[in-house]
Amino acid sequence: MIPRIDLQALIAGKAEAVEAMRLAATDIGFAIVYNTALGPNRVAQTIDMYRAFFRLPAAEKRPYDMAQTGSNRGWGAAGSEQVNPEANADYKQFFDCGVSLPAGDPLREMPFYAPNLWPDKPDGFEETLRGYYRDACSVAMQVLRGVAQSIGRPRDSFDTAFYLPMALLRGNYYPARPDWAGEKDFGIATHTDYGCLTLLATDGSPGLEVRKRGGGWIPVSAPPGEFIINFGEMISFWSGGEIQATPHRVVGGTAERISVPLFFNPAYETNVAPDGADEVVKAGDHLTKRYTETYVHLQKK
């Protein structure tokens, strides 16, 4: 059973919410949070913006195609990611944006802080996503503070690592499962997230499945205004294995589905090696390695 947690109760440190987050973080690897600053209408508006973009003709999306621009900002066409080498490339589309740095900032030369690529259509796309990105980062930080408390650490123990987060906001478009799809074809194949914490909004459609510890799969869905939380490889390593990164997938069904994950990751230079380790592992180096293994156009290079 995936815990469903009132975020305001978690912020207040109420014992029931903290214990539910401890179970989610250290055992299940997933939670659902509600009662956040991002209400149903705000999430639905953001999903509608992504939907309008994905429905544009391919020729209008092509100028923002990451396989052509070489950036890790913009549009990813179907087949441009392969999260599991034992499966075929994922048949979803996606659009990525991240932190906006001022012109002339040398960090803009780094992939994780690269300039965003904003399409001209649909109207209001950039404004909507910028605002959602800002507020989703705030919600994710509140969740992460609750996670820290749940595992017996100070609530602010992760705060300083997020002074310039490598937070990536993504819109995923999963079409209805294609007729040609076989046993190795997925909207997104079985994987664990690469980073720290994922704050996932969805349109409420089913599709996401979480692997149970003893085998088998649990379907997970949440309406707009509630958020699916899961933990990635980085925070599992960072916590010395105390926090669990759980495999999940989207097989695809009879209807299209849109999801909006915020991958909330610390600043590039953050040492995410566990306490007491002799080595230094930069957060940015970890993500660079994993992205290179995932993006098809980087694999070809």
Image: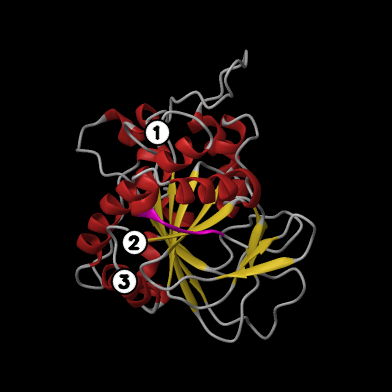
Rounded to the nearest angstrom, the CA distance separating label 3 from label 1 is 27 Å
Callout in the foreground (2, 3): 2
- Near mark 3 (Cα within 10 A), the count class, few <14, some 14-19 or many ≥20, is some
Q: Which stretch is magenta? A: 3-7
Q: Determine the residue positioned at 43% across, 25% down.
A: 269
Quadrant for the C terminus in the image: top right
- The numbered mark at residue 35 is 2
Q: Residue 277: x percent and y percent?
A: 62, 17
Whether residue 196 is situated above or below residue 59 in the rendered picture: above
At label 3, the amino acid type is Pro
Judge from the rendering whether residue 246 lies leftward or rightward of residue 22; answer left or right: right
- Circles 3 and 1, Cβ within 8 Å, touching? The answer is no
Q: Residue 178: x percent and y percent?
A: 63, 82
Judge from the rendering whether residue 63 lies leftward or rightward of residue 249; answer left or right: left
At label 2, the amino acid type is Asn
Residue ID for mark 3: 40
